[in-house]
Image: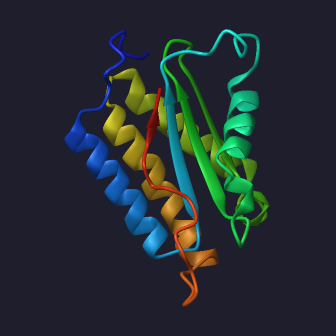
């Protein structure tokens, strides 16, 4: 499903993704974080991708956003796993099927080694409910860094 080479995004692709995150966050009160792991750590090897995503969600303080609108997309390359979670504010507006559909669409792109388009597709699909239910507010601030974490 994924390339064995862990350099899945070049600098231009990373910039395109971070620009898309900035665009979404500039038009909504959401905070989005994307984390790409080469592999599970020794300590996490028996955990599910969802459990690791919850740990990263907390570690990156995505639960501390003003409107509970943090979102995390976690990609674990070696284990070929993806997890997508949203905080309670967003989760109250969308269904489990919404999250599952995005993950499945990303997996389809990743199967043909189209990582950038898979991530951008996820961001595009997230944008609609974010713009609808969580429009930008005059006092909104960027609470979480837009940088991708690749480790």
Specify how the rendered protein is coloured. rainbow
Q: Which of 67 and 59 is in front in this view?
A: 59
Q: Horizontal placement of 120 versus 143: left or right?
A: left
| Residue at the image position 57 percent from the left and 35 percent from the top | 74
* Coordinates of residue 4 in the picture (x, y in percent): 37, 9
How far across and how far down the image is residue 49, in percent?
68, 25
For this orientation, the residue located farthest to the left is: 12
Say which residue appears at 41% left-offset and 48% top-offset: 121
Can you say whether 71 is above or below 28 in the image?
above
Instruction: Tell me residue 61's x, y (percent).
Output: 69, 52
- Residue 119 in which image quadrant: top left
Q: Check the picture and name the quadrant holding the N terminus.
A: top left
Relative horizontal placement of residue 44, taking residue 33 as reference (left or right): right
Q: Answer above or below: position of 68 versus 121.
A: below
| Residue at the (38%, 48%) spot, across then down | 120
- Name above or below for residue 55 compared with residue 39: below
Circle count? 0
Q: Which residue does the image show at 30% across and 43% down from the upper left?
A: 14
Name the residue nearer the viewer: 63 or 96. 63
């Amino acid at each position: 499903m994924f390339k064995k080479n862990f350099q899945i995004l070049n600098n231009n692709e990373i910039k395109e993704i971070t620009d898309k995150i900035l665009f979404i966050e500039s038009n909504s009160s959401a905070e989005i974080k994307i984390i790409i792991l080469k592999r599970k750590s020794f300590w996490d090897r028996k955990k599910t991708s969802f459990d690791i995503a919850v740990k990263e969600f907390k570690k990156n303080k995505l639960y501390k956003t003003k409107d509970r609108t943090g979102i995390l997309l976690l990609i674990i390359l070696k284990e070929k796993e993806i997890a997508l979670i949203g905080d309670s504010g967003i989760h109250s507006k969308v269904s489990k099927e919404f999250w599952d559909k995005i993950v499945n669409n990303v997996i389809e792109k990743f199967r043909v080694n189209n990582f950038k388009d898979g991530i951008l597709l996820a961001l595009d699909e997230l944008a609609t409910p974010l713009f609808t239910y969580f429009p930008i507010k005059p006092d909104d601030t960027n609470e979480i860094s837009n940088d991708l974490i690749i480790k």
